[in-house]
Image (cartoon, helix red, strand yellow):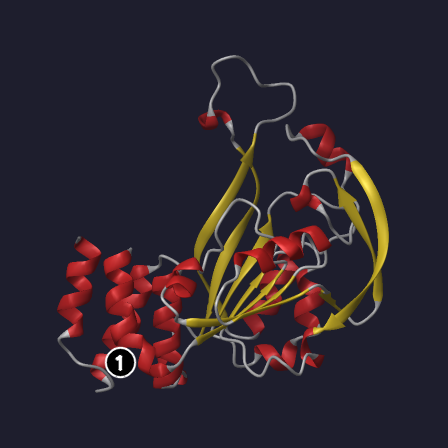
Amino acid sequence: MTQIMDVARRAFSPFGRVKVVDIGANPIGGDAPYQALIDNDMCSLYGFEPQLEAYEKLLDLDHPNATYVNAAVGDGESHKLHIYRQDGLSSFFPLRQANIDTLNFSGHELVRTVEIPTVRLDDIKEIDRIDFLKIDTQGAELMILNNGDTKMKAALAVQIEMRFLQLYDGEPGLGKLLDWLSVRDFEFHNLLVLTRFMLRGTRRPGFNRRMKHQVGDGDGLFVRNLTAFDKLTPEEIGRLGALACGLGQSNLGFYCLLNLIKAGQVDPALEADMVAAILA
């Protein structure tokens, strides 16, 4: 990964920093998926986290070129936030009891509910451009996208939580989310994260991860005009290439590089350097 990012920095940095917007930036489970961009000074970051404790953890990270806001993004109205014992379950929607009864997971005890205001993505003046939107808000993704249509017109890629088995009462179905992305020319590239569960009551001594067969949700990566690169500018392809490498999607990064070489935008010698880095 380090060698790939070395080549990516030389190839793609001339096209500008990748502008990342992270909605639901709670640092659960370690580094952000775009950490390599942070480490290589290749992005600027604007992140949102409504839960104060998680927001303070983000500030402690002291990332360069990062701005974090203790706020929720939504439709501009106030909503009731359901806070559960497991930090990553908090949502504008209540957990679906049938799901809790079926899946083997813990932390679903409701701690409290609080009414919080939200801000529309399109109304955030500090965000002048979105190259990459990461959005993980436990069911509120479509609400956010519907109120960020203008900002999203020039976005290059979206990493978004996809629910395969309903977890919350009232959350929009996956089909509606996929329709929103498809209409705006975002094409599916890869599944970056996939969460699996055992069904409740089936755990036995010696069972391991291979027994987690029930798919719950996952993070999908969608790229605008993935199959129509001629609609992207060289600057957009360059920033997309940097993003792809930063997310560990070296094939997409290499594809961006080849397109830039073909357009006479970067040194052709970088092709061999990228191949060597990928093979290392």
Q: Is residue 242 left or right of residue 193?
A: left
Q: Secondary structure at mark 1?
A: helix
| Residue 273, above or below 126 | above
* Residue 92 quadrant: bottom right
Residue 237, percent from left and from top: 36, 78
| Residue 142, above or below 219 | below
Q: Is residue 242 left or right of residue 73?
A: left
| Residue 157, above or below 199 | below
Residue to which mark 1 is pinned: 260
Circle 1: residue type: Leu
* Residue 279 quadrant: bottom left
Whether residue 166 appears in this view of the structure is no
* Residue 273 quadrant: bottom left
* Residue at left offset 39%, top offset 62%: 39
Residue 82, percent from left and from top: 80, 48
| Residue 45, above or below 87 | below
Tell which residue pokes out farthest to the top in this image. Answer: 205
Residue 239, percent from left and from top: 39, 76
Seen from the viewer's position, the closer of residues 100 and 131 is 131
* Residue at left offset 50%, top offset 44%: 194
* Residue at left offset 50%, top offset 63%: 63
Circle 1 residues within 10 Å: few <14, some 14–19, many ≥20: many
Seen from the viewer's position, the closer of residues 164 and 83 is 83
Q: Is residue 273 left or right of residue 254?
A: left
